[in-house]
Image: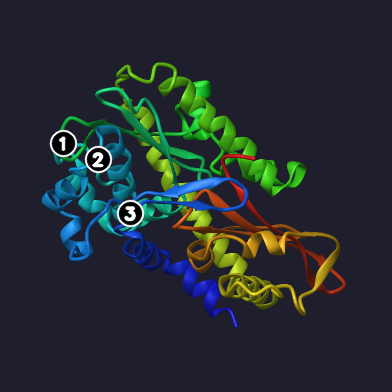
Amino acid sequence: MIAFFQVMAKHRAHVAMAVWLFIQGLAVAIPIGIGTTTVVAAQTGEESSGASALSPEGLAQMLVELEPEGRVVTVASMMQAVGRSDSERISDLFGADNSVWPNNISGEGPELDVAIWQSFFETAVIVPGNIESRRPVVGFYSPLLDIWLLTQWDKTARVPQITAVDVTFSQILESGQTGLSEIDPHPRWVSSWQSLGLVESIQSQSRAAVAKFESRFLKNPGQDQALSPSRVRQRVAFRLLHVRTALMASSLAEAAIEPERAQLVDTLLARIADGKSDILAGLPVGKDALLLAQETIALPELTRVSLLPAAALISDQGFAVIATSVATPRIFVVIEAKNGGGTQELQLLAPFDAIDE
C-alpha cells in the first residue's frame, strides 16, 4: 500500500541520475504553464555516453562550441547532477584544486556527506549571478532547506572551474547571527505554514532569498565579487544543512507510517505520473478544497514521472506533502489533507513555482 511513497522517497538519487541520462544531449526550455524553467545540458552527440561525458576531457569537448557564459551555467547544471549521486566527484571534475569542495561537513564521514549533498542538490534551483564577470558566482538555492551553496567559477579555463565555495543561509546574511542556539533548525516556511498557507510561505521565503542574492551579485553584472567564507559561519551552515536534511527525511518517514495518509499520497502521485484526467476519482475531497488537477497533469511528462515526496508537515488538523522533481526542481506539487468525518479529506492539490508567482 505504501511502497511508492516509502521506497521512492528513499531512492531519489536513482531517479535523479535517470533524469540526467535522459536529458543528456539536450538543451531545452520546458514550458510548465505557470512560467518557464530550463533543464540545461550540453550537446553530446549520438556516440557519447554518460560516463565518458562526465570526465574533464569529455566536458571540454562538450563545451567547445559554447560561449564562456553558457559554459558556466551548463557546467554548474552538470555539477548539480553529479552532486545528486556522488558529491565526492565534484572536486575532480569541477574544482580548480582538490581543496575547493568542502569535505566532512557532517563530521561523520563521506557516506553521510554524500547523502546530505544529495538531498540538497535534488531540491536546489540554480540562480546565476554576475555571469558576465571573469569569475562569476552561481548560486544553488534549496527552497525546502532555505540554504544556499555559493560557487565562484573561473570561466577562462577550457572547462569552467570552481575556485571558491560558500555555504550560507538567509538568516545569517540578514542578521549576522553565528550561533545555532539563535537560529531555528527548521526553514522559515515551516513556521508560517498555517498562518500564510504552504504555497505562499515557500514563495515569500524564496523570493526574499533570491532578491538578497541578486542584490549582491547582479548589481554589477560584469564585476568580480570574491566570495569570502567565514570558518565560523561555514561550520554553522554545515551543521544546519545536516539538521534540516535530517528533519526533512524524518518528516517523510513519519508521514508514510499512517496507512491512509500514505495511500492518498501514493494514489495521487501515481495518477499524476500517468497523466490521466481523472486523477481525483474516488478520493475523499474536502468541502472547500482547491484542486488544480488539470494544471498538475499539464506539467511536462518528465516532471510528472519524476515527482517524488521531498518533505511533509503533520499537525492535529491534517498533513501536507511536498513533491518535487529533479527535472524541474523549482516546481513543487503540494498535496494537503485535513481530518474530517473520520477520514483524510483532500484539501489542496496544486503545482507552483517556488521562486516566482
Left or right, 146 with respect to 20, comes to: right
User: In the rendered image of this protein, does residue 276 appear above or below residue 134?
Assistant: below
The three-letter code of the residue at mark 2 reads Leu
Q: Give the percent coordinates (x, y) of residue 69.
A: 30, 33
Q: Tally the numbered discs.
A: 3
Q: Secondary structure at mark 1?
A: loop
Can you see residue 328? yes
Using the numbered discs, state the Cα–Cα distance from disc 3 to disc 2 in whole angstroms: 19 Å
Upstream in sequence: badge 1 or badge 3: 3
User: In the rendered image of this protein, does residue 348 appear above or below residue 175?
Assistant: below
Q: Residues within 10 Å of mark 3 (few under 14, many from 20)?
A: many
Choose between 79 and 61: the one closer to the eye. Answer: 61
Q: For mark 2, what is the residue?
A: 66
Upstream in sequence: badge 1 or badge 2: 2
Q: Residues within 10 Å of mark 1 (few under 14, many from 20)?
A: some
Upstream in sequence: badge 3 or badge 2: 2
Residue displayed at 60% across by 83% down: 1
Quadrant of residue 167 in the image?
top left
Asked whether disc 3 touches disc 2, contact meaning CB atoms under 8 Å apart, the reply is no
Q: For mark 1, what is the residue?
A: 96
Q: Residues within 10 Å of mark 2 (few under 14, many from 20)?
A: few
Q: How has the structure been colored for display?
A: rainbow
Which of the two marks, 3 or 2, is nearer to us in this view? 2
Q: Secondary structure at mark 3?
A: helix
Q: For mark 3, what is the residue?
A: 81
User: In the rendered image of this protein, does residue 114 appear above or below residue 1?
Assistant: above
Q: Secondary structure at mark 2?
A: loop
Choose between 116 and 350: the one closer to the eye. Answer: 350
Quadrant of residue 314 in the image?
bottom right
Choose between 349 and 164: the one closer to the eye. Answer: 349
Using the numbered discs, state the Cα–Cα distance from disc 1 to disc 2 in whole angstroms: 20 Å
Residue displayed at 52% across by 73% down: 6
